Amino acid sequence: MGFRTEPSASSVALSLRAVALGYVVLPLFALAAGLNDGRVRSWPALWAGAGLLVTLGGTHLLDRRRVRRARYREFVPSRAFLQVTTAIWAMALAGVAFGLHGGTFLLLPVLPFVVLSVLGNRTMTRRGMLVLVAALGTETAVQLPAFSAFWATLLFSATALVLAGVVDEVVRASRRAVERNRHLAALATDTSALQDWPQDLTELGPRLARAMDVERFAVLTRPARRDPLERVFSWPEPEWPSWERLGTMPQQSLERMRPLSTPALSVAPARTGTAAVVVVTPGTSAHGVRVEPTLLSTVAALLVAALSRNRLISGLVEAAETDQLTGVANRRRLFEALTHEVARARRSRRPLTVAMIDLDHFKQYNDTFGHSAGDDLLQRFALRTTSRVRAQDLVARYGGEEFCLVLPETDGDGAMSLVDGLRAGGAGTDRLGRRVTFSAGLATWDGNESVEELVYRADASLYRAKAAGRDRVAAAPAAPAAS
């Protein structure tokens, strides 16, 4: 029949029970009418109405039995519409059988029609209105003059339509609230699992929109108090809204820490520590009503909590993978990077070279100038080396005064040129202005060896450089060609 509805099981059960009330109310009204008038005005209408009631009651009991046995889980709108239509005609026939009695029996067909609004299906309500008008028209036409029948039908139909509209709006608003709460609960779970801010928001875009009941939205963030707001995510249009359209609303909202709205836009802020998030939506929801500020504030609070948690986790991960003294990668991060780069070199068939570097006579340096001076030298060397390599290269502290360089897409000659240039400038100067030297060993991945074997060859080259007199760079011999 073209009906579309997704009511919950509880709402369907309540709706059908509401229809069932009509089965009880109608005989009571019929009995009262019979006692008051003392006669039946139309026996055919009475028997037809009674037959419809028996059919209606039987289908209702059958549906309840199916529900109890868990054999009838799906709500079928056409079945409910047929039951309600049957109830409307049964009550209209009762009016014909016993008389109008001041409009009492004209109200009875309205009751099952209003139930259609509880079901939340506007297609059913529109078609049910046609059925109701036909039933009321029949009931009045056989008992009233044509002019009076027309106005009575119009009056009771209009009353039924107003009641149905009110009930429909209340039920739909309740369902939207339930749906929003469900989406918010799911959203809270999803945002707590965000690992990559703001890239992971792409997957949450549709759910965020449903939770806020909007067709588009944007997320602005401010990393620190003095930083400007920047748009980090917008759904489904990447550039919505333009900064010209936004104006100063987001900044004002954040300064006052309360939602702001205009007919065109609504914004809501949330803040934790130095970080802040501002959610921007259209002024009206997807259902044409004003966007709820408290709802936007709740979503903003979830997002700023996710941002703060993501920054904390990123900071912990960075701390776990960073050498505390020099600020470069530590040994753990080194081997993770080497594993990744070896796999990438295997796929791309591009060279990969590793350089092991050791500061010469570092123990003597510490004994002469003190450990704090030695720490300062290590920091200066790490900073100088980091500034000389490419962004894709990795500088790591291997241990003590030993460092490791990972040089992707770099062959032996390129690595020799880079490291020997670093060596020429020295590791730094001591407190007497003398140059501090270092030795280095290089190894280029042979296409088959493991990470450990690659590092071992570079380390072996380093020891050859030291044995040859220090302050020099030695390269591991090229791997023999495969036979």
Image (cartoon, rainbow, N blue to C red):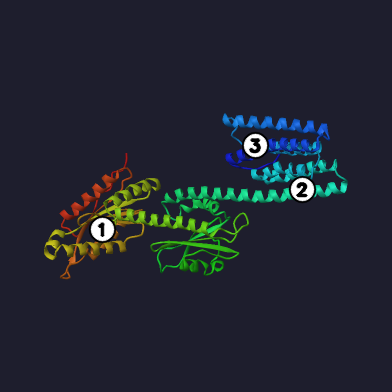
Residue 71 located left or right of residue 335: right
Is 16 left or right of 292, judged from the image as shown?
right
Residue 133 in the image: state x and y as whole percent: 78, 44
SS type, badge 2? helix
Q: Residue at x 82, y 41 (%)?
A: 138
Q: How far across and down, in percent of the image, does residue 386 sit?
A: 30, 61
Residue 127 visible in the snapshot: no
The residue carrying mark 2 is 156
Which residue is painted at 65% across and 36% down in the image? Answer: 76
Q: Residues within 10 Å of mark 1 (few under 14, many from 20)?
A: few
Q: Which residue is mark 1?
A: 324
Q: Which residue is mark 3?
A: 76
Name above or below for residue 118 compared with residue 382.
above
Q: CA distance from mark 2 to mark 1?
A: 82 Å
> Is tag 3's residue or tag 1's residue first in the polypeptide sequence?
3
Disc number lying in front (3 or 1)? 3
* SS at mark 3 in the image: loop
What amino acid is labelled 1 in the image?
Gln
